[in-house]
């Protein structure tokens, strides 16, 4: 058996390849990005796996579902908030069911290292009523992802694999198994009855009843799963899952007086939980994310005669990531001996890179709006969100991808003036185009800044869907009048002209769009470094 040193995210990607997928679909988002990047890198020459970025997570999910319908296995991966975007096809796919196995790998971000919230995807799994697997280490990330494809085909349902940042982004040796026998195509299963996939009410009711009648089977599978490990010892019990299992193991090193249940499968393995609860007087639940297991264990009325601890009674903090020390303290164990810091560098706030095109755009916006003290600037998610920080302090909102245009339209309808918004090229094609259609249709009194740096910079420089002239054509096609579509090149030498163009756009009492076109400097460097050696003078990319 071979062994490979893999990130948790890479272990998920490799397992999908070894399970014989026909395709992998995703939209970039930390900490899930490396799943598709790994699959792209490792299947580039194989040819039989289609691995490419999608326009957004909903599209990625639907592409995976289409591949499944056509009889091939499909992997779809995203960060947790991406599942909000993909939730419509995700929830409905539990009714349609799947043909080729569909595995959804979701990476949650407790502690919000690079996210706007720390929602827990297990709730989505329960909401859709599908099986969820939660690995606690890189080996399990590999093993469970492979198994998830078999489960998906066995139950005819999508299966979710939930990982978290610290697992996705840490490495360990993983023993890998030979690729599935039929990995060269994984057959092409015959298409299902099209009525199953066509959710008109008569079919949808039938398919929803199928999903409901499957629930006892799923609960039975979960209760019988050998992945959920129960060891009964003393009257103090611990229920743990995912990454938190490692912290419990570390805290208990050398102690065997606690009873312990490790949960890996959802719906919750009720029989195993009952065994532990019957055996123990006091139970602490240690889980990464929201108190999902804990809230279900407590129910509405609690468990009479049992003492339950966790995030809901303050034994563990309700927000942020768990740490080995937090868990040790909650279990009444000594904390680990502190490791001396390797340096005394203090933390630094993030900032736009020196030479970033967004910096020049913000400088021009700030000077152009100096005469308008009531300016509101809605922003979006990307490197340009850093315009909220000094020295710019120009950004007044950042809610979710694509929100800037719709929020600006709402504010314009409230009579606010001037209303501005900034959105990057990738965020625009992710979910900014639809609100623009409405703003153009009603000639909303607002100015949109489309920051075209020709890449998805914030997540590491993935390729963008549309940039340059194509983006300008797209804007016109969506209804932006040519006379109010302006292009600027954000460079210091153009500052005066750019301020003048922006001022004109703001003074126009209707919709204006200013496209700031200049490539991200890291993208430029990457492109230069990729040029033949004789031509290249550039440094390697810093990110
Ligand atoms: C729903 C969702 N998906 C993915 C992400 C991760 N993400 C943050 S910003 C961003 C795109 C940024 O690209 P762009 O809008 O072109 O701006 P740039 O960073 O290039 O300036 C992505 C994919 C997210 N925050 N939310
Ligand atoms: S990565 Fe590119 S877009 Fe992002 S801050 Fe740096 S230069 Fe600007």
Image (cartoon, rainbow, N blue to C red):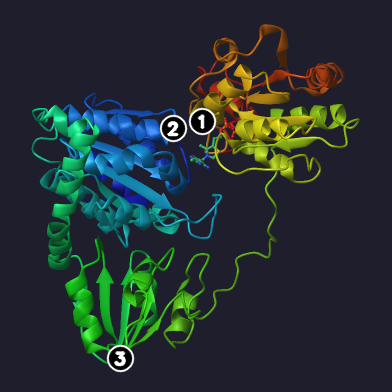
Above or below, comparing residue 426 to residue 165 in the picture = above
Q: Residue 116 placed where, x, y %? A: 56, 50
Q: Residue at x 52, y 37 (%)?
A: 460
Spatial CA span between label 1 and label 2? 8 Å
Q: Is mark 2 within 8 Å of ligand 1?
A: yes
Residue 478 position, x and y percent, is 55, 15
Query: Is 263 in front, or is 455?
Result: 263
CA–CA distance in space, label 3 to label 1:
51 Å
The quadrant in which residue 469 appears is top right
Whether residues under marks 1 and 2 lie with C-beta atoms below 8 angstroms apart, the answer is yes
Q: Residues within 10 Å of mark 2 (few under 14, many from 20)?
A: many
Left of 116 or right of it: where is 3?
left
Ligand 1 within 8 Å of the CB at mark 1: yes
The label on residue 431 is: 1
Q: Which residue is mark 2?
A: 56
Question: Could you say whether the residue bearing mark 1 is in a helix, strand or loop?
Answer: helix
Local packing at callout 1 (Cα closer than 10 Å; few below 14, some 14-19, many 20+) is: some
Identify whether 348 is placed above or below 302: above
Choose mark 1 or mark 2, whichever is in front: 1
The residue carrying pointer 3 sits among few (fewer than 14), some (14 to 19) or many (20 or more) residues within 10 Å by Cα, namely some
User: Could you say whether the residue bearing mark 3 is in a helix, strand or loop?
Assistant: loop
């Amino acid at each position: 058996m071979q062994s490979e040193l893999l990130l948790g995210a890479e272990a998920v990607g490799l397992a999908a390849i070894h399970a014989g997928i026909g395709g992998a679909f995703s939209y970039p988002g930390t900490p899930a990005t490396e799943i598709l990047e790994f699959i792209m890198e490792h299947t580039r020459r194989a040819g039989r796996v289609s691995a490419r970025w999608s326009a957004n997570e909903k599209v990625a999910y639907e592409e995976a579902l289409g591949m499944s319908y056509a009889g091939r296995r499909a992997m779809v991966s995203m960060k947790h908030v991406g599942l909000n975007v993909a939730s419509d096809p995700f929830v409905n796919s539990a009714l349609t069911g799947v043909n080729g196995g569909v595995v959804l790998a979701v990476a949650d971000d407790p502690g919000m290292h690079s996210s706007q919230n720390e929602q827990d995807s297990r709730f989505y799994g329960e909401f859709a009523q599908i099986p969820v697997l939660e690995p606690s280490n890189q080996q399990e990330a590999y093993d469970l992802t492979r198994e998830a494809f078999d489960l998906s085909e066995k139950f005819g349902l999508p299966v979710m694999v939930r990982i978290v940042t610290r697992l996705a982004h840490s490495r360990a040796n993983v023993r890998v198994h030979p690729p599935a026998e039929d990995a060269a195509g994984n057959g092409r299963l015959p298409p299902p009855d099209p009525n199953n996939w066509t959710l008109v009410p008569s079919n949808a009711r039938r398919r929803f009843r199928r999903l409901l009648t499957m629930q006892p089977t799923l609960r039975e599978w979960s209760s019988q799963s050998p992945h959920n490990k129960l060891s009964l010892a003393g009257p103090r019990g611990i229920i743990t899952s995912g990454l938190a299992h490692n912290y419990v193991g570390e805290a208990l090193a050398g102690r065997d007086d606690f009873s312990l249940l490790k949960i890996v499968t959802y719906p919750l393995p009720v029989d195993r939980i009952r065994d532990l609860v019957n055996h123990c007087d006091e139970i602490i639940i240690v889980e990464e994310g929201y108190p999902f297991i804990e809230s279900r264990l407590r129910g509405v009325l609690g468990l009479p005669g049992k003492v339950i601890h966790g995030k809901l009674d303050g034994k563990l903090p309700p927000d942020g990531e768990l740490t080995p020390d937090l868990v040790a303290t909650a279990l009444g164990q000594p904390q680990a001996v502190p490791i001396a810091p390797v340096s005394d560098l203090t933390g630094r706030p993030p900032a736009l890179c020196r030479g970033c095109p967004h910096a020049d755009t913000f400088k021009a916006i700030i000077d152009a709006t100096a005469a308008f003290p009531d300016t509101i600037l809605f922003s979006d998610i990307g490197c340009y969100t850093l315009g909220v920080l000094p020295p710019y302090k120009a950004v007044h909102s950042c809610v979710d991808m694509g929100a800037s245009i719709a929020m600006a339209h709402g504010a314009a309808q409230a009579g606010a003036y001037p209303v501005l918004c900034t959105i990057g090229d990738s965020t625009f094609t992710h979910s900014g185009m639809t609100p623009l259609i409405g703003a153009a249709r009603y000639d909303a009194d607002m100015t949109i800044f489309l920051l075209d740096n020709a890449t998805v910079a914030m997540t590491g420089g993935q390729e963008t869907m549309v940039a340059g002239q194509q983006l300008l054509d797209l804007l016109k096609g969506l209804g932006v009048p040519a006379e109010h579509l302006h292009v600027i090149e954000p460079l210091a030498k153009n500052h005066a002209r750019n301020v003048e163009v922006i001022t004109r756009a703001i003074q126009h009492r209707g919709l204006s769009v200013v496209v700031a076109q200049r490539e991200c400097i890291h993208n430029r460097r990457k492109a230069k470094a990729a040029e033949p050696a004789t031509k290249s003078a550039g440094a390697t990319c810093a990110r």
